[in-house]
Image (cartoon, helix red, strand yellow):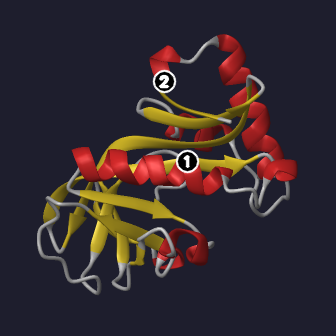
Amino acid sequence: MLLRRLGTDQLSASQIQGLRALLWSAFGDEDDRFTEEDWQHALGGQHFVVEIDGRIVSHASVVERVLHVDGQPLRTGYVEAVATEPQQQRRGHGSTVMTAVNEHIREGFELGALGTSSHGFYERLGWQTWRGPTSVRTAAGELATPDEDGYILVLRTPTTPALDIEAPISCDWRPGDVW
């Protein structure tokens, strides 16, 4: 097993092809389907991969976003495209990737954040469920995203200011899933 960290610009064409196949197989059912917009959200930052025999079996990426907590902007390492090949799950590969992700976020960001319904996996790695209301910042103003309430998790870093996890939190608008 080999853990690697690569910028999006360092991914080869075959690695991109392998990552896309991994993500689409891991999010196979219709409700959790991985979309092209989801793929675009995962690009532009750092990719953390576990390889076995040269094949990527687990992945997560961290992209920079600005989240506002109670109006205060925070430079955030936002986690995207976390997946492990279905036949490689429950072998620690996802935990290995997320441990490296956590270290990266703690070293370079004021906050870590992600959206998920798999709270237990992340909570045991130090993430907390955000209990306040969520919204998205748009050109027309801030719009509530009540379907995301309870699905956003955060990771505190050494530079995280004092936070009330019941305060409002907002993200910048983007195509597809805003969170």
Is the residue under label 2 in contact with that under label 1 (CB below 8 Å)? no
Whether residue 176 is visible: no
Q: Quadrant of residue 120?
A: bottom right
> Residue at 78% of width from left, 26% of height from top?
53
User: Disc 1 or 2, which lies upstream in sequence?
Assistant: 2
> Residue at 88% of width from left, 50% of height from top?
87
Q: Amino acid at mark 1?
A: Val
Q: Amino acid at mark 2?
A: Thr
Which residue is disc 2 drawn over? Answer: 8
Which residue is disc 1 drawn over? Answer: 97
Whether residue 35 is visible: yes
Q: Quadrant of residue 159?
A: bottom left
Q: In this view, which residue lies farthest toward the top?
A: 13
The foreground one among 54 and 175 is 54
Task: Give x and y (percent) for residue 169.
Answer: 29, 71
Number of other residues with Cα within 10 Å of mark 1, as a class: few under 14, some 14 to 19, many 20 or more: many
Task: Give x and y (percent) for residue 80.
Answer: 52, 48
Task: Give x and y (percent) for residue 56.
Answer: 71, 32
Q: In this view, which residue lies farthest toward the front?
A: 1
Quadrant where the N terminus sits is: top right
Q: Nearer the viewer, mark 1 or mark 2?
A: 1
Q: Quadrant of residue 67?
A: bottom left
